[in-house]
Image (spheres, grey):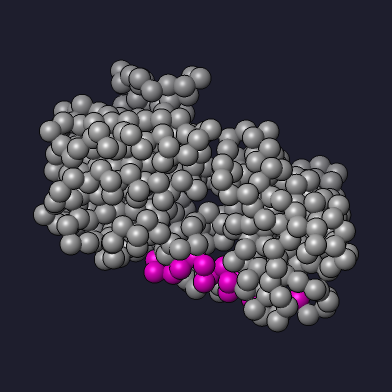
C-alpha cells in the first residue's frame, strides 16, 4: 500500500505538503515523492528504503514554492509521474493494485503507446494508470474509462493547473478524506495527517467519487457510488491508530477487537497482557481492559530507524527488521504467563523466530498468542501485501494436514469446524506457543462497526461483496 496526500492553499503549500506526506511513512518503504505547481511543475523523488522521508526531503521543500502540491510514500514504484498530454500537463500519484497490469500493458503497447518508467522489465503502475487516463476525451472521462478497464483497485491524486483532482477507487478499498483549514484544503489517505497541521475533516470521499480542490474551494465532479467494500485490514493492522476511515477511528476498533478476544478467553489464567508493537499494542490494551489483567510491555520497539517489518519487498529485509526492532525486557517476561496480541499471522516466521523465541529465552512460563483477525487464507488482490498463497501460514498448515494443496478450503474457514481446529493447532505447534486463538470474522466485523457487506474480507474468506472482476476479453476487444 502507498500513502497519498495533497494540499491546495491560498499561500505557499510546501511545508504542509512535506509534513502531510511524511505522516504516511508507515505505509511504504520504497520511494517518496512530491510535486508542486507554482509558476511551473517542480517534482522530486527519492529512494527512502534506507532512510526516512523527512531526512531526504527536508532541503527540497524549502527550495520549492507553489500553492498546490501532491505527495506520496510508495511501496514499490517511483512517483509522482509527470505527463504532458493532449489535455494539458499533470502529475499523478496512486495507491492500489492492478491485477490485470500485464494485459493492460500489452494492450497499450499494441496501440503504439510507450513507457518510460520501467524497472527490471516491469512497467511503473502509476505511469500505466496515467497512460490509460490520457486515452480519454478529457481528464474526467479518462479517469472513468480507466476505472472501466482495471481489475483490482486504484485511488489517485492528479495535480494540474486547475487544482488537485482526487478520485477514490470505485469500490472504496482505499479511503480518501478531505480536510479544511482557513487557508487551505487537503486530501489524505490517513486522517492522522490533519490534526497537527490544523485541518478539520469535512468530507469522506465515497467510492468512485471525484472532486477538484483548489484555492477557491472544493467541487464535486463525479458523484460517488453506493457500493463500498473498504479494506477491513486498515483497522486491524495497516492504518495509523490516530486515523479514521468512514468516520470510525482505528485505535478504538483495535481496543474493541482486543475486548472481543478476551471475552472468548475464559479458560486460561494469565499474569499480563501484551502486544507486539506497534500494531498489536492497541489490541492488547483492549484485552487487558476486558480481562482485568495488567497491560505490560515485555517487548519494546526500538523506534528510531526501524519501520514495519511487513512492508519491505524482500523477506531477508523483513526478517532483519523483525529481529532488530524488538528488545525484550527480561524482568517483565521471566516466570510470567503472557498473552501476546499480534495483528495477524501472515507467514508466521517472524512471530515465531523474532518474537516468541525472545519471550521463551527470557523465561516466560506460558505464552498465549491472540490474533485479532481470522487466519489469512488468500493473498490480497486489491493492495500490495502478501502476494503468494503458498507463503501463508494457514495454507502451509492445510497442505501439511491434507498432504497436498486443496482448492476448496471452506471447512478450514469455518471457525466451528473440526478442520479449522486442526489447522489452528498445527499453527500453534509451528510457532511454538502454549495456546493460539484467532478472532472470528463476525467479532472482527463487530469491532469495526460497519455492516459486513461494506467491508472487503477477501483475504480471510475469499469472497467479495461485489464481483470485482471485469470481462477482460470484452475490454481488450473494445479497445482495439
Let me know if residue 248 is in the magenta part: yes
Numbered range of the magenta stretch: 246-265
Let me know if residue 17 is in the magenta part: no
Residue 118 is situated, as x and y percent measured from the top left of the image, at: 42, 21
* In the image, residue 343 above or below residue 28: below
- Residue in the foreground of this view, choosing between 281 and 15: 15
Quarter of the image that includes the C terminus: top left
Q: State the predominant SS element of the stretch in magenta.
A: helix
- Residue in the foreground of this view, choosing between 244 and 285: 285
The number of numbered discs placed on residues in the rendered structure image is 0
Residue at image position (51%, 38%) is 29
Task: Say if residue 122 shows up in the picture.
Answer: yes
Residue at image position (18%, 40%) is 66
- Residue in the foreground of this view, choosing between 275 and 305: 305
* In the image, residue 152 above or below residue 373: above
Task: Say if residue 398 shows up in the picture.
Answer: no
Residue 170 is situated, as x and y percent measured from the top left of the image, at: 36, 52
* In the image, residue 292 above or below residue 110: below
Q: Quadrant of residue 101?
A: top left
Is residue 37 toward the left or the right of residue 353 in the image? left
Residue 479 is situated, as x and y percent measured from the top left of the image, at: 31, 31
Is residue 53 toward the left or the right of residue 299 in the image? left
Residue at image position (19%, 37%) is 65
Amino acid at each position: 500500500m502507498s500513502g497519498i496526500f495533497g494540499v491546495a492553499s491560498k499561500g505557499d503549500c510546501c511545508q504542509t505538503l512535506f509534513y502531510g506526506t511524511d505522516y504516511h511513512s508507515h505505509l511504504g518503504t520504497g520511494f517518496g515523492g512530491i510535486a508542486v505547481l507554482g509558476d511551473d511543475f517542480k517534482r522530486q523523488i527519492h529512494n527512502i528504503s534506507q532512510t526516512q522521508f523527512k531526512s531526504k526531503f527536508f532541503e527540497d521543500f524549502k527550495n520549492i514554492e507553489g500553492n498546490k502540491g501532491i505527495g506520496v510514500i510508495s511501496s514499490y514504484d517511483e512517483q509522482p509521474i509527470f505527463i504532458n498530454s493532449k489535455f494539458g500537463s499533470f502529475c499523478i500519484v496512486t495507491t492500489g493494485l492492478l491485477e490485470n497490469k500485464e494485459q493492460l500493458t500489452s494492450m497499450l503497447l499494441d496501440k503504439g503507446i510507450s513507457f518510460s518508467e520501467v524497472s527490471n522489465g516491469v512497467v511503473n503502475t502509476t505511469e500505466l494508470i496515467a497512460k490509460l487516463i490520457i486515452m480519454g476525451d478529457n481528464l474526467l472521462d479518462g479517469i472513468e474509462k480507466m476505472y472501466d478497464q482495471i481489475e483490482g483497485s486504484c485511488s489517485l491524486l492528479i495535480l494540474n493547473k486547475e487544482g488537485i483532482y482526487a478520485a477514490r477507487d470505485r469500490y472504496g478499498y482505499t479511503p480518501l478524506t478531505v480536510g479544511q483549514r482557513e487557508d487551505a484544503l487537503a486530501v489524505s489517505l490517513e486522517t492522522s495527517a490533519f490534526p497537527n497541521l490544523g485541518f478539520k475533516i469535512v468530507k469522506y470521499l465515497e467510492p468512485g467519487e471525484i472532486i477538484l480542490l483548489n484555492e477557491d474551494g472544493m467541487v464535486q465532479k463525479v458523484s460517488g457510488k453506493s457500493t463500498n467494500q473498504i479494506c477491513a485490514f486498515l483497522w486491524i493492522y495497516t492504518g495509523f491508530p490516530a486515523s479514521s476511515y468512514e468516520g470510525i477511528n482505528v485505535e478504538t476498533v483495535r481496543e474493541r477487537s482486543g475486548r472481543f478476544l478476551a471475552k472468548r478467553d475464559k479458560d486460561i489464567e494469565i499474569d499480563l497482557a501484551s502486544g507486539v508493537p506497534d500494531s498489536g499494542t492497541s489490541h492488547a490494551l483492549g484485552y487487558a481492559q476486558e480481562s482485568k489483567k495488567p497491560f505490560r510491555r515485555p517487548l519494546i520497539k526500538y523506534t528510531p530507524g526501524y519501520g514495519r517489518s511487513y512492508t519491505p519487498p524482500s523477506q531477508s529485509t523483513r526478517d532483519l527488521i523483525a529481529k532488530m526492532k524488538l528488545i525484550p525486557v527480561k524482568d517483565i517476561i521471566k516466570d510470567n504467563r503472557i498473552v501476546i496480541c499480534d495483528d495477524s499471522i501472515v507467514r508466521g516466521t517472524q512471530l515465531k523466530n523474532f518474537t516468541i523465541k525472545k519471550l521463551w529465552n527470557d523465561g516466560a512460563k506460558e505464552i498465549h498468542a491472540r490474533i485479532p483477525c481470522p487466519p489469512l487464507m488468500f493473498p490480497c488482490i486489491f493492495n500490495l501485501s502478501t502476494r503468494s498463497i503458498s507463503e501463508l501460514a494457514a495454507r502451509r498448515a492445510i497442505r501439511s494436514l491434507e498432504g497436498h494443496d486443496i482448492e476448496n478450503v471452506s471447512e478450514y474457514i469455518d471457525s466451528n469446524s473440526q478442520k479449522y481446529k486442526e489447522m489452528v493447532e498445527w499453527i500453534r505447534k509451528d510457532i511454538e506457543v502454549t495456546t493460539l486463538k484467532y478472532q472470528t470474522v463476525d467479532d472482527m466485523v463487530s469491532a469495526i462497526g460497519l455492516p459486513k457487506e461494506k467491508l472487503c474480507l477477501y483475504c480471510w474468506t475469499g469472497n467479495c461483496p461485489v464481483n470485482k472482476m471485469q470481462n477482460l476479453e470484452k475490454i481488450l476487444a473494445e479497445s482495439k
